[in-house]
Image (tube, coloured by chain):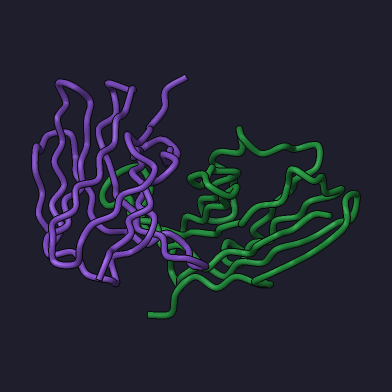
Chain colours: A green, B purple
């Protein structure tokens, strides 16, 4: 089966600019996640969707970050305005089950964001 | 707050030897643990998981051991190969968001 797709793979912007990332999960996966991975650290969950509803966005900096998953398939993550500390890899993952059973998440290749 | 961490940031092993990567967790209520492998420029890849009602689980060349008494998790890789070189993360979760540790970089010496 096709994996999780993300674009772009790399993005360089200046601080205070806006940026958007796109994710297409594995077909049929109801749960979609966005993670932020700062260099040398493990991924940190930003937001979790179940279909097109938000399950957990407690760690999303809502003053500058936003995410949506229209129609419960693709998702976009936006940062506006970007700060230097937003430089990281943004990972999208999807899974077929939530709240029981296998919790295996399938990750995309990520988008590496550099904020100058 | 609760956290998941790793004992060592780097590990170098000779090709063909066995590798052991350790992880400590602090949330005694954690009931599900996962090991991920992340190669350079790629997203994490699921390796193996284990539930808290088990002490050991084996996969292909990998074994995960869970010691709930000391809240310790380990990943054993048998006959380590150059393709095993990567950063390995343990993570805890099930009905909560996955919490990842910082990772251990495994380098395989040919």
Q: Is residue A10 left or right of residue A41?
A: right
Q: Is residue A87 left or right of residue A99?
A: right
In x, y percent, where is residue B65? 13, 41
- Toward the right, the furthest residue is A16
Q: Is residue B58 left or right of residue B10?
A: left
Q: Nearer the viewer, residue A20 or A115?
A: A115
Q: Is residue B19 above or below residue A106?
A: above
Residue located at (19% from left, 44% from top): B50
In x, y percent, where is residue B91? 36, 42
Q: Is residue A33 left or right of residue B5?
A: right
Q: Is residue B108 above or below residue B105?
A: below
Q: Nearer the viewer, residue B58 or B83?
A: B83
The image quadrant that residue B67 belongs to is top left
Q: Nearer the viewer, residue B31 or B8?
A: B8
The image quadrant that residue A17 belongs to is bottom right
Q: Nearer the viewer, residue B37 or B95?
A: B37
The image quadrant that residue A22 belongs to is bottom right
Residue located at (42% from left, 41% from top): B100
- Toward the bottom, the furthest residue is A1
Residue located at (44% from left, 41% from top): B102
In x, y percent, where is residue B88? 35, 52
Residue located at (28% from left, 63% from top): B108
């Amino acid at each position: 089966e096709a994996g999780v797709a993300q674009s772009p793979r790399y993005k360089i912007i200046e601080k205070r600019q806006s940026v958007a990332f796109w994710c297409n999960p594995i077909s049929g996966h109801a749960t979609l996640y966005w993670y932020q991975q700062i260099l040398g650290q493990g991924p940190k969950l930003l937001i979790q969707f179940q279909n097109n509803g938000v399950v957990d966005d407690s760690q999303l900096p809502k003053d500058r970050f936003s995410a949506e998953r229209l129609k419960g398939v693709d998702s976009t993550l936006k940062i506006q305005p970007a700060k230097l500390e937003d430089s990281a890899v943004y990972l999208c993952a999807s899974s077929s089950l939530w709240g029981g059973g296998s919790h295996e998440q399938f990750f995309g290749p990520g988008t590496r964001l550099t904020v100058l | 707050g609760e956290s998941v961490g790793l004992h060592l940031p780097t590990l170098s092993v000779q090709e063909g030897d066995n590798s052991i990567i350790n992880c400590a967790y602090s949330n005694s209520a954690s009931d599900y643990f996962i090991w991920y492998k992340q190669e350079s420029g790629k997203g994490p890849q699921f390796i193996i998981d284990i539930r808290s009602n088990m002490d050991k689980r084996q996969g292909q060349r990998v074994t995960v051991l869970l010691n709930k008494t000391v809240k310790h998790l380990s990943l054993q890789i048998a006959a380590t190969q150059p393709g095993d070189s990567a950063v390995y993360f343990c993570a805890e979760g099930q009905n909560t968001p996955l919490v990842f540790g910082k990772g251990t970089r495994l380098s395989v010496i040919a």
